[in-house]
């Protein structure tokens, strides 16, 4: 039985599991949680098919699910907390620029000199960071992703702010799986690592197709995979390199 932390996604070691109380503790982030709901499904599923999931992923925060007629509809909120922080930074940055450059602009004389060219360049470059942060923050706060699964069709729609969606022919999908995307960046404060999760599919020709990316937690990605497979009646199986299970 593989057990993963519901807070950070790390695998729980054997000494962090108590089968008597059905409680687990993560050695990475020290989160404590119950896994009784997962364990209840373990034995019948494992006996039926050793290659299928041995637990049922509960519906995580940030994901809502309902049925529209015969269609399955999953809705994911974008990262509103990071969006608020980014939006706040962008607004603060623009306010600071306004108070710093207003006196300079008021006394500014358009004379072709090194100083005037420098000020003009700063007026073009510095506000761009604030504008980008405001726009990115608004996307994070306002936008949601709707995943509609109908008979053989998977469609992703993002809104209310415009963002390109996708449409897939699910008849060509042999298996869905979750992958992990790790990106690193370096700044003055040090090296920063960002981990996101994405839902992919293996087609009948053996190619990989990206369905959804940028998910904050493995539970969100695994729940989306699980519900799409159930709706389309795709038997779950291991995929090499799959997050948490592949080998």
Image (spheres, rainbow, N blue to C red):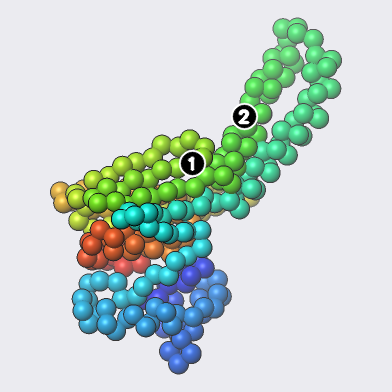
Rendered residue at 48%/56% (across/down): 216
- The residues tagged by marks 1 and 2 sit, at their Cα atoms, a distance apart of 24 Å
Q: Earlier in the sequence, mark 1 or mark 2?
A: 2
User: Quadrant of the image for the N terminus?
Assistant: bottom left
Q: Is residue 152 visible?
A: yes
**Secondary structure of residue under mark 1:** strand
Rendered residue at 47%/53% (across/down): 76
Which residue of the protein is positioned furthest toward the top in this rendering?
A: 111
| Disc 1 to disc 2: CB gap under 8 Å | no
Q: Is residue 13 visible?
A: no
Q: Position of residue 25 (x, y in %)?
A: 51, 79
Q: Position of residue 245 (x, y in %)?
A: 31, 68
User: Quadrant of the image for the C terminus?
Assistant: bottom left
Left or right of 133 in this view: 144: left
Q: Position of residue 146 (x, y in %)?
A: 42, 48
Rendered residue at 23%/46% (across/down): 169
Circle 1 or circle 2, nearest the eye: 1
Q: Position of residue 39 (x, y in %)?
A: 38, 82
Vertical position of residue 2 compared to residue 102: above or below: below
Say which of 148 and 53 sits in front. 148
Which residue of the protein is positioned furthest toward the front in this rendering?
A: 69
Q: Which mark is residue 25?
A: none
Which residue of the protein is positioned furthest toward the bottom in this rendering?
A: 20
Vertical position of residue 188 compared to residue 37: above or below: above
Left or right of 61 in this view: 188: right
Vertical position of residue 7 compared to residue 40: above or below: above
Label count reads 2
Q: Which mark is residue 128?
A: 2
Q: Which mark is residue 159?
A: 1
């Amino acid at each position: 039985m593989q057990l993963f932390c519901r807070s950070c996604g790390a695998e729980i070691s054997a000494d962090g599991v108590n089968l008597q109380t059905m409680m687990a503790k993560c050695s990475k982030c020290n989160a404590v949680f119950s896994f009784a709901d997962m364990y209840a499904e373990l034995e019948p599923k494992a006996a039926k098919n050793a290659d299928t999931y041995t637990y049922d992923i509960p519906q995580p925060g940030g994901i809502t699910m309902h049925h529209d007629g015969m269609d399955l509809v999953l809705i994911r909120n974008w990262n509103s907390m990071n969006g608020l922080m980014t939006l706040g930074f962008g607004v603060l940055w623009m306010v600071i620029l306004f108070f710093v450059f207003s006196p300079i602009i008021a006394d500014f004389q358009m004379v072709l000199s090194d100083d005037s060219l420098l000020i003009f360049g700063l007026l073009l470059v510095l506000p761009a960071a604030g504008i980008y942060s405001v726009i990115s923050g608004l996307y994070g706060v306002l936008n949601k992703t709707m995943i509609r699964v109908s008979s053989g069709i998977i469609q992703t729609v993002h809104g209310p702010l415009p963002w390109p969606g996708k449409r897939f022919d699910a008849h060509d999908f042999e298996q869905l799986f979750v992958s992990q995307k790790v990106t690193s960046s370096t700044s003055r404060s040090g090296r920063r690592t960002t981990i996101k999760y994405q839902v992919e599919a293996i087609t009948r020709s053996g190619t990989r197709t990206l369905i959804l990316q940028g998910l904050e937690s493995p539970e969100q990605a695994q729940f989306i995979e699980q519900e799409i497979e159930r709706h389309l009646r795709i038997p779950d199986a291991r995929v090499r390199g799959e997050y948490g299970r592949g080998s």
